[in-house]
Amino acid sequence: MAFKLNSPTAYTYIANQIEIGANTMADSGPASLLEPRISLITLGVRSLETSLAFYRDILGWQPSSASSEDMFVFQVGKMAFSLYPLDKLAEDACLPPPASPAFGGITLAYCVREKAEVDSIFATLEKHGTTILKPAQEVFWGGYSGYFADPDGYPWEVAWNPFDIRPRNEAGDIILPQ
């Protein structure tokens, strides 16, 4: 369609497209600003080398070829997980870097298929000298879990859940009921 950008025809065309889009969205139910997914989790780390050694050599995760000398990226299921220098990440987010590691109000979780896997994972972590925050144990919500810390103190939970939040397929995906 040819018309001048500032012409009434252009405004009418744009208004009609907006109305068509609004009607389409109204017909399909409430629209989400963001699709319900997480694409990437980036941890700000004090030492890339130390963190890389932990995630690669202890957890067994292999960095992607998308990694660079100042950022390591891992494929984790259908999303990406990365390690980036803490000061650079804080600068990128326009935040001051924390003076010391502290609980940031978030945990990362690895859910297992069988209860015995929790103990097996913790035995291996202990063998490598990983900081155990909470040994594996029966928990109030009916599952079995424990917490360990990565080299920067980020808390990871390893959990077996007998309810709906557990791996549902060979890939280990969590598939919640509707």
Image (cartoon, rainbow, N blue to C red):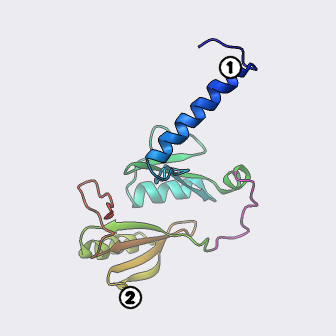
Find out whether the residues at labels 2 and 1 contact each other: C-beta distance under 8 Å: no
Q: Is residue 96 magenta?
A: yes
Give the residue drawn at x 57%, y 30%.
17
Circle 1 residue: 9
Q: Please name whichever residue, 54 or 16, is drawn nearer the observer in this view of the structure.
A: 16
Amino acid type indicated by mark 2: Phe
Circle 2 residue: 140
User: Callout 1: helix, strand or loop?
Assistant: helix
Amino acid type indicated by mark 1: Thr
Dot label at residue 55: none
User: Callout 2: helix, strand or loop?
Assistant: loop
Q: Is residue 59 left or right of residue 19?
A: left
Marks 2 and 1: which is nearer the front? 1
Q: Residues within 10 Å of mark 1 (few under 14, many from 20)?
A: few
Please tell me whether residue 95 is drawn above or below residue 133 in the rendered image: above
Residue 137 in the image: x percent, y percent? 35, 85
Please tell me whether residue 87 is drawn above or below residue 146 in the rendered image: above
- The answer to whether residue 67 is visible is no
The residue stretch that appears in magenta = 93-102
In which image quadrant can residue 146 be found?
bottom left
Residue 178 in the image: x percent, y percent? 33, 62
In which image quadrant can residue 18 be found?
top right
Residue 40 in the image: x percent, y percent? 51, 50
Q: Is residue 53 magenta?
A: no
Label 2 or label 1, whichever comes before in sequence order? 1
**Most frequent secondary structure within the magenta stretch:** loop
Q: Is residue 60 left or right of residue 12?
A: left
Give the residue drawn at x 59%, y 73%.
105
